[in-house]
Image (spheres, coloured by chain):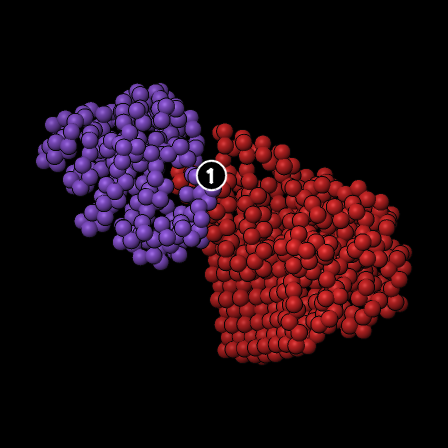
Chain colours: A red, B purple
Amino acid sequence: MPATRDTLKTIEDLGGYKYGFATDVASDVAPAGLSEDTIRFISAKKEEPQWLLDWRLKAYARWQKMAEKHWAKVSHPPIDYQAISYYAAPKKGPDSLDDVDPEILKTYEKLGIPLREREVLAGVTNSRYAVDAVFDSVSVATTFREELAKVGVIFCSMSEAVKNHPGLVQKYLGSVVPAGDNYYAALNSAVFTDGSFVFIPRGVKCPMELSTYFRINERNTGQFERTLIIAEEGAQVSYLEGCTAPMRDENQLHAAVVELVALDSADIKYSTVQNWYPGDADGKGGIYNFVTKRGACRGKNSKISWTQVETGSAITWKYPSCILEGDGSTGEFYSVALTRHKQQADTGTKMIHIGKNTKSIIISKGISADHGDNTYRGLVKILPKATGARNYTQCDSLLIGDQCGAHTVPYIEVRNAQSTAEHEATTSRISDEQLFYCRQRGLTAEDAVAMIVNGFAKEVLQKLPLEFAVEAQKLLGISLEGSVG
Amino acid sequence: MLLKIDNLHVKLAETGKNILNGINLEVKPGEVHAVMGPNGAGKSTLAQVLAGREGYDVTEGDIIFDGENIAEKEADERARSGIFLAFQYPVELPGVNTAQFLRTVVGAQRGKAPNAAEFLKQAKQVLDNLNMPHDFLQRFVNVGFSGGEKKRLEMVQMALLQPKLAVLDETDSGLDVDAMKLVAGTVNSLRSADRSFLMITHYERLLELIKPDVVHVLSGGRIVKSGGPELAKKIELEGYSWL
């Protein structure tokens, strides 16, 4: 059919994935391989204190005793951890934004991420949000730090936090996701290279959106970043991360850890637009996105809300979770996961109700096309003391074509009789009738699918900060181009 | 000539069953044609084939619309060239906001989304004409609509899209008298020298409210008789057996 041919052609012209370019920049790359020496090398590069090196080495010892677990519904050939380089950084270490390698600045420009504050201030771009830009293993720039510092907000790279705020890092690092939590978290604890650090002091509402943009550029490297966000009593912050990577035939590993801590009445909103390179139509290449994200609602009436739009990666394995310790605390998880070609996603959440009157809501929207395989896996656990706890879970799956898969695996454990857990699940398909109806009104097949998919995902998309919601909508449309015809 | 169907033969792609066996039909700009006929005559197939529905194979003949042979064109191309089909069974689009949908499809046809505020005003006016509350705009397309409401939303779309040729596939079926009057009112208000209608119907009732220029009887995949409004009257009284 002509329309399909046109679409396929357009995609070929675009290369299918418009973030797939690589930046030519001189990098410091550690030789492939993992040993205690690798860890000492990373720690020395970052001029870390002894306690952190010890912490890393302990994690490494744990990791060596662990084995990859295979309970997730994903499959991949064994990963050769000795073939990965654990450190890659652009050679020229910048001291300020003006020192950042112009090639890297250009890269972020191409990705649409404003790193030049003066342009943002001059209204060259309309978005005003602070960015921490992580390029391979290191943070290359963090914007708006002075302005944020005026209200006591700390927003910097993890490496700088270790140097400048060691007390906070030592207190909270690994306190939500312990080093030995799981195989990938242990690996990350041993070899993490950078990431973002956010501290919002008591009573402060962060005056702007914070965001981190993760970019993998080097070949054969893994990215192991660690993000730590602490919101003190009554503090509020909205944080967003985005991720892309060049198109490469080999798979690359991204194993991150994110820890959130919310004290009394604090509110953390964490949004992700994950668009790592997904691999090609035959499943060649793409990122293995094996990520541990967890938030602790430690304080009374605190709230942690996760929103994720997952369109990229060859394999996604992540379960952003909430530990609802504080009485009256709230955990939220809103997710859209899209898999097409041969992508696999096994994603969901864990809501652990410990405190009284804790609430959680889970809205998961899975979209599968081509040979994509999409699993929602979630745990709702209500512990004996969580009287009055409430959970509501809704999992919807949308299938496009007849070769894809959608699976829902909810685990519900209720150990308090005075609590409620509700679960609803639906599976639907974009029907030929729907497509014809939209096309009869003049929409192309692609526009029709994008409209139906966006309608399906709307409940989640509208949880994103406004400017990103629009981007995410477009991303869903682009990610599905050529999936019907 | 706005539409010229020339010796059109169509079979079902899946089963190979012949449905249309040599249709000839000419519609001039501004004309209203009615197509009647017993169940299974091929009326709805004709509507679907005109709109470009997949699953039908045109084995012979041409469909010339506005001077162009459209038999091989995609459904959305035909729609953008000015063919509108009011569905016999309008389709539900869960999650898709009706106002957004209307503005998107109008934008797709005009090449540019209309100004939101002006469009909303226009849409509300059209809803008023069809006696539909404005809150329909905030509901999902056709989701939870009654049969009559779905048919009226088809008329809303027709009024906003202003097609050159509107094909109404049994829009009157399942409508009560009041709703049918509203539908007829919309069609009559849209009648103009450069817009034509092809109305597929079982009943003569609608044709009393919308006076057709020509009435055709379709049977066995062929047009077996054509005439003026009196033909519809005769069918109402005598059925199809005399043909």
Residue A31 position in % (x across, y down): 87, 47
Q: In this view of the protein, can residue B235 be seen by the observer?
A: no
Q: Quadrant of residue A187?
A: bottom right
Q: Secondary structure at mark 1?
A: loop
Which residue extends farthest left?
A: B237
Q: Chain of mark 1?
A: B
In the rendered image, the vertical position of residue B105 relative to residue A336, given as above or below: above
Task: Say which amino acid is labelled 1.
Answer: Gly
Task: Mark yes or no: residue A106 visible.
Answer: yes
Q: Which residue is mark 1?
A: B111
Which quarter of the figure has residue A267? bottom right
Please tell me which residue is depicted at 29% across the width and 53% down the height of the picture: B128
**Residue B80, percent from left and from top:** 41, 35
- Identify the residue at image location x=81%, y=46%: A83
Nearer the observer, B100 or A136: B100
| Left or right: where B206 falls relative to A107 | left
Task: In this rendered view, identify the residue nearer to me: B103 or A326.
Answer: B103
Q: Is residue A126 above or below residue A48?
A: above
Q: Where residue A245 sits: x, y (%)?
A: 71, 46
Q: Is B232 placed above or below A192 here?
A: above
Asked if residue B11 is positioned above or below residue A264 in the image, the reply reads: above
